[in-house]
Amino acid sequence: MVISMLRKIPRKYFEIFDFINRHIKKRPKSIFIYSNLGFRDNIKAIYDFFINDNRFNDYKIVCSLNNYKQVSKNPPKNVTFVSNIKGIFYFFRSKYCFYCFGKYPIKPADNQVVCNLWHGMPLKTIGNMQKGCENIKYNYFTYVLATSQFYKDIMKKSFSCSDEQVLICGQPRNDEMFVDNKDKFYKLFKECTKLNKAYNNEGDKTSFNKVIVWLPTYRDSDDNQKLPLLDNNGLNAINDKLVKDNSIVIIKPHPLASIDYTTVGEFSNIFVCDQSLLDTCGVSVYALLSMADALITDYSSVYFDYLLLDRPIGFTVEDMSKYEEDRGFVFDNPNDYMPGMKIHNQEEMITFVKDLTEANDLYKEERKKINEVVNFYVDGCNSERICKKIGLL
């Protein structure tokens, strides 16, 4: 990947790119979007905002993506998709630039606005707070996003930036949780059923008592090869409970995970939906979450987003001590910021499902308390709000 190659080049050689960027005239109605890990998350959300708002019809929008060939069919007239190498030349000419995965290690020009939207408020350490990354330079932006005043200092420490560079705003990706996504969900679920050998599709059934979305985070170890907690016996017990309650679990693996999910298709009410299937159906993780009655995750920042919907969350934390030792958390007391049932074993997983289907919501007040701390804005207007704060609107 481009970023992997760029990291091998000594920083002093990039000073020529800084010089070029400072002296090239920027086009005032030009927007540049970058990603080296697919077209998704915050950059896809803000792109969708641009192309669906007629105030941007006369802007030139360039998307520089590692997978640009997969998504470049029939773009709007004012949109161009390019490779990450070619994207450098468009970056030099663009007044407004956005990224959330990867970056060009080039300093923004004085007449340029570069927004690091990142990809979630962290529970685990990121950037300069991560072990072994303390001296890496990450500050190649005008602004970095933080969803609340509480997270301002954490983002400052993570990216070694100033107060003025931290933009308090919600994440663009969360806007999709505030719209009706029923049709998208039905389309996605239909594709999921094709991969599930045990599903009995009587009458194209798409109505369930409860829908649970499970989002395991990425692990930099052999643990990334397996689904937390559950072997086939555990999956069988969960599936029996789901069948009894007319409910389903949809497992969405992390895009970098290498878990073998082939056996999951042997259970009638447990489905797997990977990133490629989401992309094929044109559905984001956040459209999927908007239809979920509950979330199961572990140390993923996605649960801070899901708090906006005020629905139950279960945390698989059986390896928390090991994860803290290997990766680390931004809080000294991470449990205090995880408002939901802590799931250590298969029996507790079944209890979580049981509580959900029987409407035993024991953590509502905790969720409210944490949500007030981590999410200053609680609506679906973040893309527009960001554009106003940076002077694009």
Image (cartoon, rainbow, N blue to C red):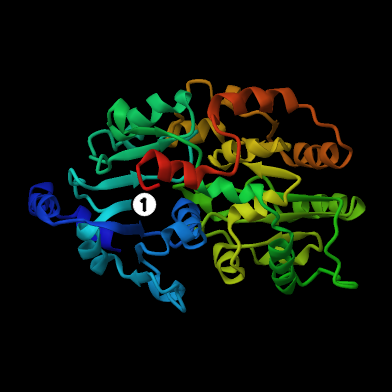
Left or right of 63 in this view: 137:
left
- Residue 126 in sight from this viewpoint: no
Closest to the observer, 176 or 369: 176
Residue 18, image x, y percentages: 12, 50
Q: Of the residues shown, which amino acid type is indicated by label 1?
A: Tyr
**Measured along the vertical axis of the image, is residue 176 above or below residue 343?**
below
- Residue 309 in sight from this viewpoint: yes
Residue 106, image x, y percentages: 19, 50
Left or right of 346 in this view: 152:
left
- Answer few, some or many: residues within 10 Å of disc 1's Cα (few below 14, many 20 plus, some between 14 and 19): many
Residue at image point 86% right, 42% down? 357
Residue 191, image x, y percentages: 70, 71
Q: Secondary structure at mark 1?
A: strand
Left or right of 27 in this view: 58:
right
Q: Quadrant of the N terminus?
A: bottom left
Residue to which mark 1 is pinned: 99
Left or right of 13 in this view: 375:
right
Closest to the observer, 384 or 148: 384
**Measured along the vertical axis of the image, is residue 220 above or below residue 50?**
above
Q: How many marks?
A: 1
Residue at image point 30% right, 59% down? 30
